[in-house]
Image: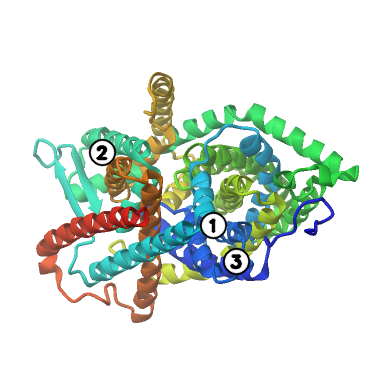
Amino acid sequence: MSKKNLSGLEPRKELTIRGLILGVVITVLFTAANVFFGLKAGLTFATSIPAAVISMALLRGFKDSTIQENNIVQTVASAAGTLSSIIFVLPGLVMIGWWTGFPYWESFLICLLGGVLGVMYSIPLRRALVTGSDLPYPEGVACAEVLKVGSGGEAEGVEESRAGLLAVVWGAIASAVFAVIVATRVFASDVAHYFRIGGGDKGPVTGFDFALSMALFAVGHLVGLWVGVAMLLGAVIGWGWGVPHFSALSGATGAAADVAQATWSQQVRFLGAGTIGVAAIWTLLKLIKPVASGLGSAMAASRVRKAGQAGALPRVEQDIPIGLVGIISLASLLPIGWLFAHLSVESGLGDHVVPLVAGGLIYCVVMGFLVSAVCGYMAGLIGSSNTPVSGIGILAVIGAGLLLVLGIKPMLAPGHEQGLVAFALFVTAMVFSIATIANNNLQDLKTGQLVDATPAKQQWALIIGVVAGAAIIPPILDLLNQAYGFAGAPGADPSKALAAPQAGLISALAQGVITNNIDWSLITTGALIGVGLIVLDTVLRRTTKSAHLSPLAVGLGIYLPTSATLMVVVGAIAGAIYDRRAERGPKPEATKQLGVLLASGMIVGEGLLGVAIAAIVAFSGKDAPLAVVGPDFAGTSVWIGGASFVIVMLALYRWAANTSRRAST
């Protein structure tokens, strides 16, 4: 007779020491990759699926390993894919000149405390957005399928698990080798061309920049065709209309590339901000009813537990008790209040420390919960990889800035504007940490629901992942700051600085709101574009089978540089072609999943290699320490790099299709 625990459920290995250690190791590696890649391209990647594959391959040697234990590993490691999104805000403090580096304990606490609150907020949201909704959670479902196949004891499951691990490894090796050759400058890093329309010194400008990045191509494969199409539409709005229109109005002279980049950075990106803001508000309005229902069911579960009937709750309904959630949340607010008070004194705002701390805490609690709901909904709709959490950051920083202008600035003498900007960014960073972890945790909880995992154990596991991610992010940010710097930061070399596009935009918004020099007409125009897109998307979803144009993705395409969007579009189209061909094969789903794992490996390989190259740059003091050719080779390197990129991608796709075919025979 099998033993049972007090709740009447079969005992099994789920939250284990070895699983937590493995999850922490993967978290550290993937966080480093994500931080670099996010600062370079403005995008981060979800780490759940590659972490699950690695876990299954390594834990298969233990006879007592379970699917739930593998699920815990991916839950811990998934923090790398989301907590690293703090890079969309935190570098802004360097960009405005408030920080020269990243103070370890302040940066660590922002990530840690916001992450813990994100986990707590996701608990009542789980009932509204996971168990009580029909949201598809594409990445959560995909991860569950990977776990089910790879954790099975059948020979077929073993073979597919090995093939999946090989796909991750080959993808990582190919992208890492390609990145090394790009660093030598034998292969070009991008194909860019900027020009004036109609000629003349003052004519409108436009252009394009294709980054030869396997990681960006892989992101496109993962986000899917319609998100890629939406990003392409955003790029067309930005560079087919926005940049030419505003550059023509300004009549700026000079190099086409310089004029185009300045027009996009100073004007067009704010159109994207308005579009993303409207799309996020629309999403929030649709969530009011399910969130209220989720809170009600969480309270009901708590009453069942207090009545001594915890065993009546199914395993997949056992969260961290709502009372403990409240205690942990309140305890987290104490050090957050201390951080706000410390910053108030540092910035010369010590006379107003009480309203600043009280207002900051209330804003974090309320805005943190609202944006958690929005991000969780978006993760359920399009996957956490596709969720433009930076759009939420835009809303948060505008809200924080406006409240400071209305409540604090009138009581200050002139000259304290930078301190207010720093405080707005600090509060936004905290809200951002909350939102990103809630976004990720709901995806993981969907996976757990599908593999019969215990939500409470996943929630504790994610807290451990938050600690690991928070510990590694500050030194990685410091390393990259020393090696490259950030575009727009004081003293940064523009030729080698990391773009950090979201951090630049959010810090610019904070400065614009506080100093009252923001062009609200740009944001208003972007908002009107967003309204039109919401109408178009609604019509498409009601009148077609699968066509849609996510307003959030369109907004992302407007305000990200083309170097970060065009290759994503190419990857989305290529991924759709690969999936369509897979549907004609003997095992379409297995073939598609192999493509997903291959893409995940490409992102991991280039991201980790990027961190290694950054370390070499930092310690060597040279801009391109691995270069073996000079600038005169640039024209040739474009052709060699472009051709090699196409050949390698075709070879990898062909290998994935053939491997899946062999595994099915």
Q: Amino acid at mark 1?
A: Gly
Q: Quadrant of the C terminus?
A: bottom left
Give the x, y percent position of residue 313. 78, 43
Q: In the image, 492: left or right of 150?
A: left
Mark 1 and mark 2 in contact? Answer it, CB < 8 Å.
no
Q: Comparing marks 3 and 1, which lies closer to the viewer?
A: 1
Q: Comparing marks 1 and 2, which lies closer to the viewer?
A: 1
Pick out the residue farthest to the bottom. 620
Q: Amino acid at mark 2?
A: Trp
Q: Quadrant of residue 525?
A: top left
Residue 314: assigned label: none
Mark 2 and mark 3 in contact? Answer it, CB < 8 Å.
no
Q: Secondary structure at mark 1?
A: loop
Estimate how packed mark 2 is, as few (under 14), some (14 to 19) or many (20 or more) residues with alpha carbons within 10 Å.
many
* Residue on which the image places disc 1: 152
- Tell me what residue is drawn at x 31 percent, y 61 percent: 494
Q: Secondary structure at mark 3?
A: helix
* Residue on which the image places disc 2: 239
* Residue on which the image places disc 3: 468
Q: Comparing marks 2 and 3, which lies closer to the viewer?
A: 3
Q: In the image, 365: left or right of 139?
A: right
